Amino acid sequence: MRNSPVGIGIIGAGAISTTYLENLTRFPDVEVHFVADIDTGRARAQASRFGVPHAGTVDDLLNSDEIEIVVNLTVPIAHAPVAKRALEAGKSVWSEKPLALDRRSGEELIAEAAARGLRVASAPDTFLGPGIQSALRAINDGLIGSPVTARAFFRSPGPEPWHPRPDFYYAAGGGPLFDMAPYYLTALVQLLGPIAAVSATSTRPRSSRVIGSGERRGEEIRVEIDTQYSALLRFENGVTAQAEFSFDSPFAYEPLLEVTGSSGAITISDPNAFDGTQYLWSFGEDSPREIAADESNIGRGTGVVEMARAIRRGVPQRASGALAYHVLDVMISIQESAEERCWIDLASSVERPAPLPDDFDPRRRTVG
């Protein structure tokens, strides 16, 4: 077993790469060696900005012996093909969400990784942050009794008011279901366990959207997917949940995640964030008790570090391919249920990830 920082290569130098590079270049258990992009000039610019020694093409990155984990930050439609190439090159893979756009591609990635003795994992890693982890500990400690039901709501007007190139949000692999639901569904699986069945409806109120910022401001783009989903979820343990994912709300951003149990409830901080305050409500009490998460300076890339440490220790990572595949299966099942107007039983399942240790800190060196 090697006892050195894990080498990282990033494919995709778009907007999200800035957040990953800001964090991964300061976490001591990993070393970023390479940034690659179809636009090699953009890759070189990001590499220069963050002090990464190499930049260039995807082939150049995959030929580097220094890289053990490829961080796949391409657009959703490219996630599975790029991840497969990385696995074939002998690299483990961390992908942005979703893991893939269809079940077969997701299954093939997991099988390919297993056959080669590699890892495949996927965002979101926000469930590893102090916010959801503190909620998990509260539920596991019985502070709301036995969980009974949950609610998960994401509502916004859509990304086109602020995003200068929002086209992919309204194509296959985008929309509120594939773009935002992974945060909420992954958090629910972490808190309550795997989902057994879903029933859903969906709508597409508008056939086009207008870009509100950047050089293309005022340009009309086509909407190719549904932009409003309402779902009922039934978990394997009998807990039920309501979920709504919408790009058709006038509210700028309105997240809600809560779990109600036999003796109380907990409202949970934004699952698209790493920290926040949870509020514990008990029957018979007029006001909630705050459960403040530890102050956090961590962010996206935390799951890459947890994966790197798991590789060095020879143990499973928490943000696993199996977890990402189960969430993918849930999203596709919601989509199918809305189209077919029936309950869908899920074929996949997953073990509920174990809580992180209280002292977990990606900024602390543990290898090398």
Image (spheres, grey):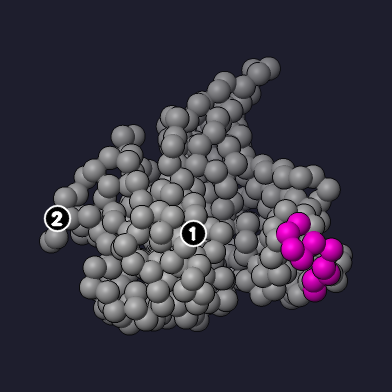
Q: Mark 1 or mark 2: which comes first in sequence?
A: 2
Please provide percent x and percent y for residue 241.
Answer: 64, 50
Rendering coords of residue 240 (x, y %): 62, 50
CA separation in Å, label 1 and label 2: 27 Å
**Element class at badge 1:** helix
In the rendered structure, which amino acid carries the disc numbered 2?
A: Asn
Residue 19 visible in rendering = yes
In the displayed structure image, the side of residue 245 where residue 116 appears, left or right = left
Task: Point out residue 338 in the picture as x, y percentages from the top left corner.
Answer: 74, 69
Classify residue 292 as left or right of residue 338: left
Q: Is residue 256 above or below residue 342?
A: above
Residue at the spot of label 1:
17
Which quarter of the picture shows residue 171? bottom right
The answer to whether residue 216 is magenta is: yes
Amino acid type, callout 1: Ser
Between residues 131 and 91, which one lies in front from this camera angle?
91
Q: Nearer the viewer, mark 1 or mark 2?
A: 1
Q: Provide the residue span drawn in magenta.
A: 213-222
Q: Residue at x 51, y 26 (%)?
A: 291
Q: Which residue is mark 2?
A: 3
Residue 270: image quadrant is top right
- Camera-side residue of 153 and 263: 153
Give the main secondary structure of the magenta stretch. loop
